[in-house]
Image: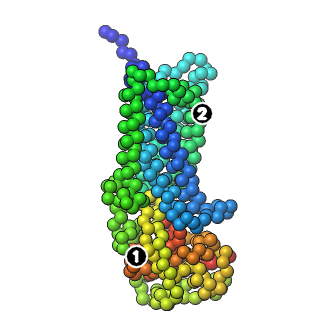
Amino acid sequence: MCPVRLPRVEDIESRLTGPRTASRLGLWLGAAFGICFLTGIWSHLQQDTPGWLTVPTSPASLYRVTQGLHVATGVATIPLLLAKLWSVFPRLLARPPRGARRLLLHVLERGSIAVLVASAIFMLVSGSLNVVQWYPWEFSFRATHYAVAWVATGSLVLHVAVKLPVIREALAGPEPSSDGLGRRTVVTATLAASVATTVLTVGQSVTPLRRVSVLGVRDGEGPQDLPVNRTAREADAVGPALDPEWRLTVAHAGEERSFGRDDLLALPQAQERLPIACVEGWSRSADWSGVRVRDLLELVGAPSGVDVRVESLQRRGAFATSVLPAQFCADPRTLLALGLNGTTLALDHGYPCRIIAPNRPGVLQTKWVTRLETLA
Ligand SMILES: Nc1nc2c(c(=O)[nH]1)N[C@H]1C(S)=C(S)[C@@H](COP(=O)(O)O)O[C@H]1N2
Ligand SMILES: [Mo]
């Protein structure tokens, strides 16, 4: 009887896997991950702006570009990460070294890789589920996705530092001619899969690719040629939004004025072409018409340089209110929109009126507005 022998790394490490393939894929993975991380940090800063930062109002499409890149590079990462895990998978069979010191180093290195793999998978899974708006968990998506991003990035930097000699050696010198083609094919095929996955989804923010992106979760259907994130019904806003008694209140330092929709339409109207750029990755430009927020604030004597709290008819949920920072209030492109793409704003897009400002994450473009109030 032949003795049972556990397979060794060499048994299953084919000429296609190993450090060369892993390093090449790692370069692409690192680049995609790096862009995804930086644009993710920016998204967080735009949504949760710290006191030291003044978010610019221009370019108007900045958030559209950064968030589109964030989701596109995140999607591109999925095939790259799968191929990378496949290329190093035989290493799981590596026997631990002898000697306490080397064993300890080995355990630390394996542990850091376990943290890296787990956190990277968490980022891609939670990000993808957020894109399809499915939250099968209890925790706050944004806070957790943000915190784990730092864990993933930290363990990635550590991993690259530890592996630097192996990476250097793997990337240096010519490909061994005997197996160069096969290995190159693996990397090329992975990149092709990565590009394909991205193209199949990116049309949700790159409008000309809309028809190609069959996997894009927002196909662009919605009233007035604009997708809807949450309908009036879902927000419990139908009744109050259609109420003929609806008024908009604008308040500053004890002074209050209220307007019906006809009053607002009687004020000077402005037109702006601005995008809705949802954090979940879809975005679309539209033609908005309405009253400049700056003009409304002037009517109650509010000075420029103050932040404004925006309140929705929607009673519950994190999106029911938002704060419009001073620079957005002062920007003449920031509208209280009454019309969209040539007709009256649809109920699902925020009728009777909604905020639309340049370079703002979609979630802060509050719909079904009922009150604007300056903050001291
Ligand atoms: N009151 C309120 N405003 C809201 C939302 C909401 O749920 N409630 N969703 C926001 C999000 S996440 C986005 S992306 C935009 C989408 O605008 P649209 O549905 O008109 O396309 O509205 C924003 N305004
Ligand atoms: Mo959104």
Q: Would you say the beta carbon of the disc 1 residue lies within 8 angstroms of ligand 1? A: no
Pointer 1: what residue? 341
Looking at the picture, tell me which residue is in the foreground, 177 or 13: 177
Q: Mark 2, residues whose alpha carbon is within 10 Å: few (<14), some, or many (≥20)?
A: few
- Residue depicted at x 36% and y 57%: 209
Q: Quadrant of residue 186?
A: top left
Q: Position of residue 267 (x, y in %)?
A: 52, 88
Q: Amino acid at mark 2?
A: Ala
Q: Position of residue 323 (x, y in %)?
A: 58, 71
- Of circles 1 and 2, the one toward us is 1
Query: How many numbered dots are placed on residues in this image?
Result: 2
Q: How is the image coloured?
A: rainbow
Q: Mark 1, residues whose alpha carbon is within 10 Å: few (<14), some, or many (≥20)?
A: some
Task: Label 2: state its secondary structure.
Answer: helix
- Observer able to see residue 92: no
**Real-space Cα separation, disc 1 to disc 2, in angstroms:** 52 Å
331 on left or right of 347:
right
Identify the mark at residue 161; answer none if there is no mark.
2
Q: Is residue 177 above or below residue 131?
A: above
- Farthest residue to the top: give it: 1
- Residue depicted at x 52% and y 48%: 35
- Residue depicted at x 57% and y 56%: 42
- Image quarter where the C terminus lies is bottom right
Q: Is residue 30 above or below residue 375?
A: above
Q: Is residue 265 above or below residue 374?
A: below
- Observer able to see residue 310: yes
Q: Amino acid at mark 1?
A: Asn
Q: Position of residue 354 (x, y in %)?
A: 48, 76
Identify the mark at residue 235; answer none if there is no mark.
none
